[in-house]
Image (cartoon, rainbow, N blue to C red):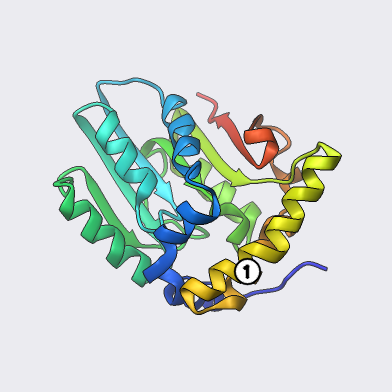
């Protein structure tokens, strides 16, 4: 049965685990989450100037990677509903001397405050499944893309190989909530994160190019806005 959770509860959930979020991402993914972001990086078109919107930016890991590896005339705007995640992200941006390139701010993906055709690229990593209204969020991301712009979504997925799927689900259902709960102090939050992956309906992304990675543990979806 699909877990029902409000935007307010999602915000509270991520605020409560923000202090251990980066550490647990690395531990629970065995450090391969960074390699997944690198695959997103390779899908970013090379331009002399670029404005990127990173939706559900969290603590800014993807935004930081993009700023450190793309053109010098890049501007990255990251939005998230969790003020605690944004606070941590801003500290990381300052620590890496990237405040001129990265702007992290509170924002609702269902109602982006940006004008039509503002961004060359829109990214969202591990955040789409947490959106209260996925269809509206996708429409908003496409709206703020420039004609010819690219939307790139990185999300967890369920492996299709039967044996690997069984091992994966055993780990995800048992160990992710257990380890996440012990370290963050919030078992229910990591139980929800586990359920959100299993409940995510990727069929809404049927018209996008699909790139499974790490045996289907995660998938990258790519599409363009028609010129």
Label 1 neighbour load within 10 Å: few <14, some 14-19, many 20+:
many
Query: Can residue 115 be seen in the rendering of this structure?
Result: no
Q: Position of residue 204 (x, y in %)?
A: 72, 45
Q: Relative to residue 104, is residue 219 drawn left or right? A: right
Task: Give the image quarter of residue 87.
Answer: bottom left
Q: Residue at x 18, y 45 (%)?
A: 98
Task: Determine whether 217 is above or below 188 in the image.
Answer: above
- In what element is the residue under mark 1? helix
Q: Position of residue 70 (x, y in %)?
A: 28, 28
Q: Relative to residue 90, is residue 226 drawn left or right? A: right
Q: Residue at x 52, y 36 (%)?
A: 152
In terms of depth relative to the viewer, which is nearer, 24 or 227?
Answer: 24
Task: Determine whether 133 is above or below 225 in the image.
Answer: below
Question: Which residue is identified by label 1?
Answer: 177
Q: Relative to residue 100, is residue 214 drawn left or right? A: right
Q: Residue at x 73, y 70 (%)?
A: 3
């Amino acid at each position: 049965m699909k877990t029902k959770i409000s935007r307010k509860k999602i915000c509270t959930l991520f605020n409560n685990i923000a202090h251990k979020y980066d550490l647990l991402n690395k531990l629970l993914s065995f450090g391969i989450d960074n390699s997944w972001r690198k695959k997103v990086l390779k899908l970013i078109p090379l331009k002399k100037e670029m404005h990127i919107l990173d939706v559900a930016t969290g603590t800014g890991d993807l935004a930081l990677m993009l700023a450190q590896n793309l053109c010098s005339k890049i501007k990255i705007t990251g939005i998230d509903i969790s003020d605690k995640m944004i606070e941590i992200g801003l500290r990381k941006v300052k620590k890496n001397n990237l405040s001129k390139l990265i702007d992290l701010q509170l924002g609702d993906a269902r109602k982006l405050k940006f004008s039509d055709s503002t961004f060359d690229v829109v990214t969202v990593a591990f955040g789409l499944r947490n959106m209260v209204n996925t269809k509206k969020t996708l429409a908003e991301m496409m709206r703020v893309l420039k004609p010819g712009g690219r939307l790139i979504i990185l999300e967890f997925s369920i492996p299709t190989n039967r044996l690997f799927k069984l091992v994966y689900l055993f780990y995800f259902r048992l160990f992710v909530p257990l380890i996440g709960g012990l370290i963050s102090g919030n078992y229910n939050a990591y139980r929800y994160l586990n359920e959100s992956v299993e409940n995510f309906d990727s069929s809404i992304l049927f018209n996008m190019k699909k790139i499974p990675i790490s045996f289907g543990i995660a998938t990258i979806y790519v599409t363009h806005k028609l010129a």
